[in-house]
Image (cartoon, rainbow, N blue to C red):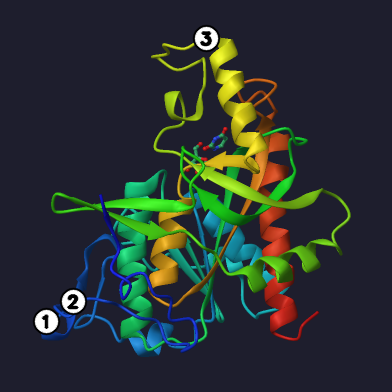
Amino acid sequence: LLPDSSIENKSYNGNRLVYVKNPHLDLMDEDILYHLDLGTKTHNLPAMFGDIKFVCVGGSPNRMKAFAQFMHKELGLEGDSKDMKDICAGTDRYCMYKVGPVLSISHGMGVPSISIMLHELIKLLHHAKCCDVTIIRIGTSGGLGIEPGSVVITDIAVNSFFKPQFEQVILDNVVIRSTELDQDLADELLECSRHIKNFPTLVGHTMCTYDFYEGQGRLDGALCSFSNEKKLEYLKRAHNAGVRNIEMESTVFAAMCRLCGLKAAVVCVTLLDRLEGDQITASHEVLAEYQQRPQQLIAMLIKKRLGLW
Ligand code: R2B
Ligand code: URA
């Protein structure tokens, strides 16, 4: 196992531009962001995206469209948000909406899906010469020992071994990257949450896994080779290590944003308490309301930053 070189692992948050750390990019005449259906020759990226200050990412295309429409209303912008155009309409891999300085993008499920999106998004922000960008993942998760519907602001993203690191396979090497998130941003989000009374918000570690079923200790997948006792022993150990929720993207999100100079946060609502069960039994109405909770918190942060609240 090779640790990241100190240069690659260094955060550049002091300087507020978005960094790409790839010498080959400078030699390319054109950069096609294939999965976003955008490119440096086909689109004027600085004109389209240069004013972006907040990027919100989440798994589901519908939820990220709803978030964009919600932000349109919250920012008091003109026009009908129903007509909002998907910037990535030329591809059905991801969707993207721009609302003033806010970009809302879907990332699909799991580490490989979000990682492809982030490579292209970070290059997009770099080509567009964006600066002072804050990026937040708003998502769903399984809770550990907390009331379903609680919102968890991640202090540290950890892997299945409760370690704050992401292992990227590069050629046939394993490179370990830090998953540290922006502490000040997490504190600012917690402060915002104190003004929202209708749901509990807490700070805790978030465990990121490569699977929803066996990888999260579920007994209800197509495959399962462990007992209920073993499952609970593992989940309780995770809880004792400070883990309060489990999802599938936070480690690679934290690692990539950190290396590219983006201040990043992860805010996920919990759909169930994994110490109580595996199946998600809440009604569609309840789940829909839960999924608006991270959006409310992020809207408050954005409005506060823009002096609108
Ligand atoms: C949370 O929810 C999804 C799985 O249901 C996954 O993308 C995640 O991180
Ligand atoms: N998303 C996850 O990854 N796990 C859960 O238990 C719920 C949502």
Q: Is residue 166 visible?
A: yes
Q: Which amino acid is tagged 2?
A: Asp
For this view, does 264 lie left or right of residue 173? right
Q: Which amino acid is tagged 1?
A: Met
Q: CA distance from mark 2 to mark 1?
A: 7 Å
In the picture, the disc for residue 227 is 3
Residue at image x 42%, y 44%?
A: 109
Please state the horizontal and vertical placement of residue 258, each as a whole percent of the image: 44, 69
In this view of the protein, which residue sits in the foreground, 36 or 20? 20
Secondary structure of the residue carrying tag 1 is loop
For discs 1 and 3, the disc positioned in front in the rendered view: 3
For this view, does 43 lie left or right of residue 271? left
In the picture, the disc for residue 28 is 1
Please state the horizontal and vertical placement of residue 62, each as a whole percent of the image: 52, 50
Residue at image x 70%, y 28%?
A: 283
User: Dot 1: within a 10 Å radius of its alpha carbon, few (fewer than 14), some, or many (20 or more) residues?
Assistant: few
For this view, does 70 lie left or right of residue 102? right
Please state the horizontal and vertical placement of residue 253, each as a whole percent of the image: 44, 58
Is there a contact, CB below 8 Å, between mark 2 and mark 1?
Answer: yes
Marks 1 and 3, the one that precedes in the sequence: 1
Q: CA distance from mark 1 to mark 3?
A: 53 Å
Is there a contact, CB below 8 Å, between mark 2 and mark 3?
Answer: no
Secondary structure of the residue carrying tag 2 is loop
In the picture, the disc for residue 31 is 2
Q: CA distance from mark 2 to mark 3?
A: 50 Å
**Residue 214, above or below 130:** above
